[in-house]
Image (tube, rainbow, N blue to C red):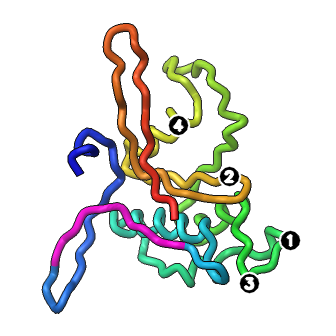
Amino acid sequence: PPSLEQAVITATLEDVHIAGIRYTTIGVPFGQQDTMFGSCAHAVAWMCLKSAANRGDIRRFVKAELVGRSNASLTSSRSIPVDGLNPHQISDLFRRVHLPAFYYATRKLEPKFGAENGSYLNPLATMCRHLNSGHPVMVESKDHAWLVCGYLTHGGSGEDSPTHQVIVHDD
C-alpha cells in the first residue's frame, strides 16, 4: 500500500502456482495459530522460517514439523492441547532447524550508549538492525507472540527526534 512505500519491510519473493500458471509474489509470510495444535509462537516461528526459506537460507518446513520438533522436556506444560512455547523452547526449535536465533530479554536491554559506536542499545534499535538485514523479528510476551516484519520512521528533522512505528503480523 502507498502508506508503506517508505517502510523497511522484510518481504521476500515466492513463486506460487494458480491453475497451472506460475506467478512471482512479494510479501511477508503469514500463518495463524489454532486452539489445539499450533500456538501463536509456532505460527510466528513458522513465519520467520518461511521467510528464511524464501531467501534460500534453509529448507521449507510445515507447521506440523515445528510442533513435532518443539522440545516438550523444556516446559512443564502439556504438548497437546498446546500451551505455547517458552523462550528456551523457541531457541531450541530454531537451533533444531539450523537457523540459530538470538534471544534478547528486553529488561536487560536498558538504553545506554554502546562502547564501540555510541548507538543506543535498546529493544527498538536492536529490532531495527535485524529488520534492516531483512530478517523478521519474533516478539514474545508472557502470554502471546507476534512477528515484527517492518517499521516506518517519521520526523527527525531539526531538533525533533524521529519516531518509529513497527509493522506487525498478529493473528
* First-in-chain label (3 vs 4): 3
Q: Nearer the N terminus, badge 2 or badge 3?
A: 3
Type of the residue with mark 2: Ser
The alpha-carbon separation of the residues under discs 2 and 1 comes to 18 Å
Image mark count? 4
Q: Which residue is mark 4?
A: 126
At horizontal 52% and vertical 65% (from top left) the residue drawn is: 171
Answer whether residue 151 is magenta in the image.
Answer: no
Q: Locate residue 14 relative to residue 10 in the image: left or right.
A: left
Determine the residue located farthest toward the right in the rendered image: 76
- Precedes in sequence: disc 2 or disc 4: 4
Residue sitting nearer the eye, 77 or 60: 77
Q: Residue at x 59, y 78 (%)?
A: 34
**Residue 76, numbered label:** 1
> Can you identify the residue that label 3 sits on?
80
54 relative to 2, above or below: below
Corner quadrant of residue 79: bottom right
Give the class, few, some or many, for how many residues have Cα within 10 Å of label 2's Cα (few <14, many ≥20).
few
Residue 40 coordinates in the image, percent (x, y): 60, 67
* Label 3: element kind: loop
Q: What residue is disc 2 on? A: 141
Gap in Å between the C-alphas at discs 3 and 4? 34 Å
Kind of residue at badge 3: Ile
How many other residues sit within 10 Å of disc 4, few (<14), some (14-19) or many (≥20)? some
The three-letter code of the residue at mark 4 reads Thr
Residue 36 figure quarter: bottom right
